[in-house]
């Protein structure tokens, strides 16, 4: 916003940069690198953020990397999954795809209610060695499992197709690249869109694929992502959908 | 190449544009839009091209679109799979992924020998309605099935991640976009690379993922490709791997 006052002698110019943040109560599920990166960014943006783990005491005692991170991010309180979720209006699921349903069942339908859940997980299954396969695939996906298990929850799948650092800093790559969203509830997709924009994503680079069944497509990108990581020798790349 | 002769009175300038095509005997398997597009391009490039089908007489009588195409592409002889393959040094597999092994078993190991087979197929399974799922997926792929079934064949997976028109005309899209190759035999990948370059692919946009197990990754891109087709309202798009 630019205002000015002027008389015959002086002109006073006032430039005001107003950023309106709708502060949201957010619980980030998962204390790994994805959860920490998302929680830090949401905190920097001024949201009311907690980070959830199964057993707070155990995490603080046994996970040195997390304990160190937590002590330098005192705004972000570490909470048991269920308490964090209960106090939040929006959840970010940043735990592994293969343990997601377990964790959500632990929180319970009553607590989850009709909150928005942004699901970043991938069903990577390392039980048969490297490269991992997908534990849920092809005719189903983690996004769909969550939505089916908790019909009132508003599940939006997003950000699961790229390296963590890029999620909250898309400008790291010089050229254009895309983030996908899908989900059944338009209002929740719009909330997610606003959060993505606040992370630095240009609106025209956010592709809405449609309903939650599109999670299949985004989760099934993981196998080529993993191989590209090897072939390119860096995880700092992303998919760009090129069209005229 | 530019040459000139000069004396005191005249300068004669000779500009010669030399294009060396190593003419290859190629059998394209499949009379669908992919097979026709690839066969036409290879013929235009000066190769010795046949196009293979299970039953030539039946195809000519019952497939009007193909019969019309064949009559306007008289250089490209239509042959039974086995005869076309027998006369060729290199095969392009342009039939559906779910019927590929049947067709190759029909040709037989003796005829296939140690030829190069460029596999463009995807295991789309329409038997459970739309959207199709993948009939082979996750811990296996059509590329791997072919290589396992015919260990002497030099299988190179490529071009299966985009719309047909783009395969032979990447310049249709203004920006950069990629084609993937993978396979176990380096010489065959180089032959494929040369063919891709002759189709118009810039060498730095051809990504070698590694061995044939990478077919999983490229085949598993299909589900999101199909959904993007719907979301973008056009099939004229392709994946570009954005990196610094």
Image (cartoon, coloured by chain):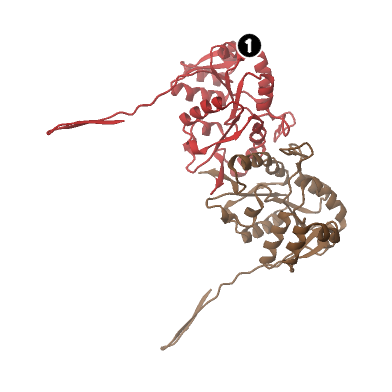
Chain colours: A red, B brown
Figure check: A93 above or below B128: above
State the SS at label 1: helix
Figure check: B237 above or below A114: below
Figure check: B110 above or below A213: below
Image side of residue A136 versus residue A235, left or right: right
The quadrant of the rendering that contains the N terminus of chain A is top left
Q: Which residue is mark 1?
A: A110
Write the residue at 82% across / 62% down: B79
User: Which residue occupies the foreground of this view, B12 or A13?
Assistant: A13
Figure check: B20 above or below B138: below
Toward which corner of the image does residue A225 lie, by quadrant? top right
User: Which residue occupies the foreground of this view, B155 or A208?
Assistant: A208
Q: Chain of mark 1?
A: A
Toward which corner of the image does residue A113 lie, by quadrant? top right
Toward which corner of the image does residue B65 lie, by quadrant? bottom right
Residue B51 seen from this side: yes
Q: Position of residue B225 (x, y in %)?
A: 65, 42
Write the residue at 83% across / 51% down: B150
Q: How many marks?
A: 1
Residue A33 seen from this side: no
Q: Position of residue B152 (x, y in %)?
A: 81, 53
Q: Residues within 10 Å of mark 1 (few under 14, many from 20)?
A: few
Check the image and name the residue furthest to the bottom: B9
Q: Position of residue B218 (x, y in %)?
A: 68, 44
User: Which residue occupies the foreground of this view, B66 or B117?
Assistant: B66
Q: Position of residue B85 (x, y in %)?
A: 81, 60
């Amino acid at each position: 916003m630019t205002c000015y006052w002027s008389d015959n002698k002086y002109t006073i110019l006032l430039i005001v940069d107003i950023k309106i943040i709708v502060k949201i109560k957010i619980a980030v599920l998962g204390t790994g690198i994805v959860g920490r990166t998302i929680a830090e960014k949401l905190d920097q943006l001024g949201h009311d953020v907690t980070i959830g783990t199964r057993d707070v005491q155990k995490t603080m005692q046994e996970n040195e990397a997390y304990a160190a991170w937590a002590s330098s991010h005192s705004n972000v309180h570490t909470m048991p999954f269920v308490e964090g979720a209960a106090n939040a209006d929006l959840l970010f699921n940043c735990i592994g795809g293969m343990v997601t349903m377990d964790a959500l069942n632990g929180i319970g339908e009553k607590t989850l209610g009709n909150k928005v859940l942004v699901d970043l997980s991938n069903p990577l299954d390392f039980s048969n060695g490297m490269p991992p396969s997908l534990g849920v695939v092809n005719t189903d996906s983690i996004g769909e499992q969550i939505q089916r298990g908790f019909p009132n929850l508003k599940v939006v799948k997003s950000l699961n197709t790229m390296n963590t650092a890029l999620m909250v800093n898309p400008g790291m790559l010089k050229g254009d690249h895309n983030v996908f969203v899908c989900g059944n509830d338009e209002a929740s997709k719009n909330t997610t869109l606003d959060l993505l924009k606040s992370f630095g994503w240009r609106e025209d680079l956010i592709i809405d694929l449609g309903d939650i069944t599109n999670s299949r497509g985004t989760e099934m990108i993981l196998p080529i992502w993993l191989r590209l990581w090897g072939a390119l020798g860096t995880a700092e790349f992303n998919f760009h959908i090129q069209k005229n």
